[in-house]
Image (cartoon, helix red, strand yellow):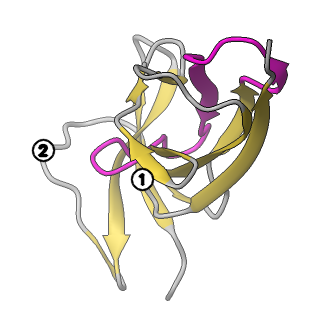
Amino acid sequence: EGRRVGVYGYAPIKDKWGFIGTNSGTVIEINGLGLGKVALIEDDNPPKISNIRPKGRIKSRKPTLSCVITDNISGVKLDATPQMWIDGIWVPAEYDLDTKKFIYRIRNNLKRGKHTINIEAVDKQGNKTRKTASFIIRSG
């Protein structure tokens, strides 16, 4: 009870386990599952957010904001996350499933000075992680 247990199916063609379902309370239900290997795995590890860019001092007033988001167990939940904010304002960043990059290109010039990026990601088991980073747009 209270544990984040996911259901995983084995795909022999890819030689890989994949997330196929989760528990709700004490009930685990799997729909549309054919014959094959199935495992129940407890997942209490949140996604990892790394390589947040830009960082340090930059010149561009229209930088590309980006990071890498990975989750090696259940996978990143994509229907409501990940999310990104610049200076407290939500931006419509896009997540690329192949590269695992989460990117937003600034459209209007940012003011010179310090700016803060906040990123949040949730995996398919509900584990949440948040990261904050900052950069400075230098004058001149």
Amino acid marked by disc 2? Gly
Count of labels shown? 2
Up-down: is 121 above or below 43?
above
Q: Which residue is mark 2?
A: 32
Q: Secondary structure at mark 2?
A: loop
Whether residue 19 appears in magenta in the rendering, the answer is no
Of residues 85 and 27, the one drawn nearer to the viewer in this rendering: 85
Q: Amino acid at mark 1?
A: Lys
Which residue, as the protein is rendered here, is positioned at the far right? 56
Q: Magenta includes 66?
A: yes
Q: Position of residue 76 (x, y in %)?
A: 47, 42
Q: Is residue 89 above or below residue 104?
A: below
Q: Is residue 39 visible?
A: no
Please report the bounds of the magenta region as a residue range: 54-81
Specify few, some or many for label 2: CA neighbours under 10 Å numbering under 14, 14-19, or 20 or more: few
Snapshot quadrant of residue 73:
top right
The label on residue 124 is 1
**Residue 55: mark:** none
